[in-house]
Amino acid sequence: MALSDLISFKGLITVSAILSVTIKYLHITLNVNRNNVNVNGNNNNVTVVYNDALASTQRNFSLLWNLLAVALFVTYPFFGEAYNFLLEALACVGVPIALFALISHCMKYGVPRRIWQLFYVAGAAVVCLLALGAAPFLDYTASQAAPIYANVVATIDLFSKGVNLFSILPFFTKYVGYPLISAMGFSFFFLSVVYLVFAFIKERDFNDSLRFSISQVGMGAMGYILACNVFVALFLQDFGYIKRVIVSPFWLFLS
């Protein structure tokens, strides 16, 4: 994303919305009631976790973004270009948000308690880099997804007219199946970026932080592959395209 796009009217509105969500959740996590705690451990080690006060917020966050992922998948054919822009804008500010949250929480609650948020920053950096690398390929994904529902109607119409199923199948696979898989991949991709950027909402220990970050990076990588149509290129044996997709996230370092 060029700087001119980020500071355009659409870019400023998008970034402002992202920052407003960030400020809201940071405010909640930085004002946890210290009397509302969980104490976990055994006779040798005791860990105090301040997640009870955030339980409702955490549940609402997970539910909200899971529903959003479904909504993204269903509506991507209509708003693909807008969603691509939102993902790219989030990728531009995601690492600074995660890093600012890490510093804020370390200052508020102490480094020993919150240092494991470094895994979130690292994970956010990986998926945000993937999102920036995906930008050139997502334009094609959005254009292919746009006529999905019209092609579903066309497929039903062909079937109702008695056209042989084996004759319909190639059309359905190319113009409905592949774009649907790409849209699903985009939803996974977008969700992984959101979860890692806003992972600071829930306090986790070393093991849980590392496990969460790795799982979300894995989901993001899978979403990247699906959203960028690597599976289609593999089927068509277009290895040049696959190489471009793999190399794209590293263009900043290779250029």
Image (tube, rainbow, N blue to C red):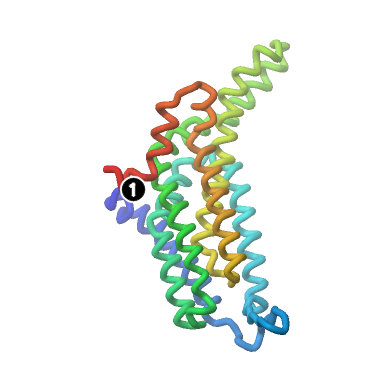
Q: Is residue 51 above or below residue 182?
A: below
Q: Nearer the viewer, residue 138 or 210?
A: 210
Q: Residue at x 52, y 64 (%)?
A: 198
For disc 1, the neighbor class at 10 Å (few under 14, some 14 to 19, many from 20) is some
Q: Nearer the viewer, residue 10 or 56?
A: 56
Q: Position of residue 95 (x, y in %)?
A: 41, 61
Q: Residue furthest bottom?
A: 35
Q: Is residue 138 above or below residue 60?
A: above
Q: Position of residue 102 (x, y in %)?
A: 46, 72
Q: Residue at x 47, y 52 (%)?
A: 127
Q: Nearer the viewer, residue 88 or 244?
A: 244
Q: Secondary structure under badge 1?
A: loop
Q: Residue at x 59, y 25 (%)?
A: 151
Q: Residue furthest front?
A: 44
Numbered label tally: 1
Look at mark 1 in the image and give the residue it sits on.
1
- In the rendered image, the quadrant that contains the C terminus is top left
Q: Is residue 66 left or right of residue 232?
A: right
Q: Position of residue 154 (x, y in %)?
A: 62, 21
Q: Residue at x 63, y 78 (%)?
A: 49
The amino acid pointed to by label 1 is: Met
Q: Position of residue 168 (x, y in %)?
A: 65, 16
